[in-house]
Every structure is written in structure tokens, then in C-alpha cells.
Amino acid sequence: MGRHITLFVTGGIAAYKVPLLARLLIKQGDSVRVAMTQAATKFVTPETLAILTKAPVVTDGSEFDHPEHVAHVELAHWTDLAIVVPATANTLAKLAMGLADNVVTTTLLATAAPKLLIPAMNDQMWANPQTQANIAHLKDLGYQLLPPETGFLAEGYAAPGRMPEPETIQLFINAQSQLTSLAGKTILISAGGTRERLDPVRYLTNDSSGKMGAALANVAAAAGAKVTVVSTKALEVLPSVTVQRVESAQQLAQAMTSLPADIVIMAAAVADFRPVTTAANKIKKTADNDEFKLELVKNPDILAALGHQKQPGQIVVGFAAETTDLLANATVKLEQKGADMIVANQVGKADTGFNVDANAVTILRPHHTPISLPKASKLTIAKQIFDVMLQANA
């Protein structure tokens, strides 16, 4: 990734997970530095984090170890992305008030970098109206927040307040973007390949993994949108994303046409046909059935239904997965479906499209020149898709 990321560690027991997070970020190519409160050093040592990051850890006792610069100001300028992890209720209150009484709060006050909060605390502290008011104020100031999960707390019971695992925090970090206008939007996304049952053990499907839909959901959720994904697959999504599982095209159609949304994105690969009948029991081969004829009927056209019943101000986006004549086929789809945008991608390749983490797409809009997005991670492609979408509807 190549970013300068500073982890601001405060005094909660969840600090023991910070070395694992630092390691994940370093492995993906980011440069990581750390600043710690005095209380944080009781849970994880500065030496541990200094060895992992190959950089000195800034603490209240070390600010003036190098008199040639002011440590917190130098770190504030170096930082591209500031992450408060774990963010205790006490630190949230200080940040909301603009206090600068330790090296963490002072550096955060001095940096212009985007700031992410990863709260972790007891459930009653999390639910306290003052804590929630502080969080609301920090959001107004531009802080992004990954809410705590419900899980086993240090107090010995399960409740809201548990810090998400490092892998989830990493996903939240990587999904960050400048798409601030998505905040508060309601976004509905379909993902995965539908399954059309032949019998209780067999079905017709395709190779779609749902990763593109998950990437779109995570980018939108990280930007503050309210996101629902209707998926045929188990997806790796942020905790704030609502996932509704379906299997068939008919189930997907029912969900996608009944849920309200400001933006609807049909990223799922929907089966064009389904069996006329589904056998109640497993279909057996016998000595006299050397052939098996399968009769199919057309599935509902979900994107066309969404495009033609589009509400005023609503944005409808479709995907076109093609193996040949990509632009020609996608252009026909754009004209016929009533969508505001079609994202066309070539499938059948080993390194992009289905079942991989990268993609390369072409975006088509009515009366606009197609925009080609070169191969990149699906998270990057998702950010670019939203950027084009929002610029077109600004």
C-alpha cells in the first residue's frame, strides 16, 4: 500500500492486539509508526512495537529524546493515516474536547491526516450517553469510526464493546476513501452467483465469488453509508454491513426489488435460466437413462426491473460479465436495462474477474465516453466505481 500509518495506542486491555495489526499492515507494504499513552505501556511494551515497526515509539517520556525536532510535530507531519487503537472512553472524551494532555492527543491535534477510531471498552461505558455524544461530535469533526463488536469482554461476559480482530481493522483501513458524500446514504448491493436447484444435492450456478460486491459494500460502509448486501455467498464484510442470504434468482429478485435504497448495485452474477421443475429427491442414474434432458425457463431480469421502476433521485448500477465483445454487449445492456451505469468486466481470465482479488473494468454511462479502469484490487476498483458514480450525479 505504501502509506505512512501511525497507530495511536491508548490504555485498554485490547492493546495486546496492536502488534498483530501492525504486522498485518507492514506485510501489505505500509510503513507503520506508533505513539502510546503512559497507560498503554502497561498492556504492551514500546520495545515490542519498536522491534516490529523498525521505528522508535513515541511516548510521553521520550518526546525530547531527539532535540533536533519536536517528536509529536514530526510524527504529525509524517502521518498519512492516523488510527486510534484501541480508543478508550477516556481518550474519546479528550479528543471530543480538543484536549492535548499527552503525546497521543497532542499529535492527533497536530496532524491533518484522516483519523480512524477503533473503540474498545466495557459495554456500559460504550452505551453511556456521554460516550455516544462524544462519538457523534467526533464524527461531525471528520473522524471515521469502526464500531466495537459484541463478544467476550475482559470482565468475563459477552456484550458490545469488544475491539474487532486485527484482520477486520485491516479491512476497515484498506476500505477508506475520500467518498465523504456516501455518508448517510442507503446502499443496496447484490453479490455472488445464484444457485438454481435441480434436486436437493445439485444446482446450476457460476463462478462468481461475491468479492466485488463485498468490496463495494466495504468501501461504502467505511465511508459512513448504511449498507445491505443480498448475497448467495458468505462474505468478508465490515460489522456494520447487513447481509441477507439468498440462493436463487427468484429469491434475489424479491429482496432487491423490495428493499429501499438511494443507490442499488447489481454486482451478483444471476443465472439466466432455472429448471422448470426441481426434483424432490436426488436424481438417480439407472441402466436405462443414458441421457438426461434438462428443461429450463427464463429467470426474472432483476436489473431491468430495478431500472424501469427507479425512484426519483435513485441511482441504479449493473454489472456485465462477458467473455467476448465486452463493450458491444455492455452497451446493449445499458440501453435495455434503464440503468444509470454499467460496469463491464471480462470474465474467464485467470487474473481478473471471478474468484480472484483483482479486477479490470470499463464503466459505461448514457451519452458518455466509456471509462476504462486498469487492473487493480477489487477494493481499489470499488472506490473508483463510486467516484465515477458520484461525480456523474453531483
Image (cartoon, rainbow, N blue to C red):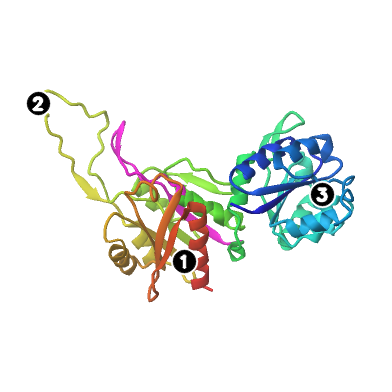
Report which residue position mark 2 lands on: 288
Q: Amino acid at mark 2?
A: Asp
For label 2, the SS is loop
Q: Amino acid at mark 1?
A: Ile
Q: In the figure, is residue 145 to the left or right of 75?
A: left
Find residue 168 and report its image quarter. Answer: top right
| Mark drawn on residue 251 | none
Q: Which residues are magenta?
A: 184-211
Mark 3 or mark 1, earlier in chain: 3
Residue 272 seen in the figure: yes
Q: In the figure, is residue 225 to the left or right of 299?
A: right
Spot the residue most to the bottom: 367
- Return the residue nearer the eye: 116 or 92: 116
| Mark drawn on residue 315 | 1
| CA neighbours of label 2 inside 10 A, class few (<14), some (14 to 19), many (20+) | few
The residue under the point 69% across, 59% down is 114
Report which residue position mark 3 lands on: 91
> Image height check: is 324 above or below 126?
below
The residue under the point 75% across, 45% down is 55
Q: Amino acid at mark 3?
A: Thr
Magenta residue check for 187:
yes
Calculate the distance from the C-alpha at mark 3 to the C-alpha at mark 1.
39 Å
Estimate the x, y position of residue 176 in percent, counting from the top left. 61, 55
| CA neighbours of label 1 inside 10 A, class few (<14), some (14 to 19), many (20+) | many
Calculate the distance from the C-alpha at mark 2 to the C-alpha at mark 1.
54 Å
Mark 2 or mark 1, earlier in chain: 2
Magenta residue check for 195:
yes
For label 1, the SS is strand
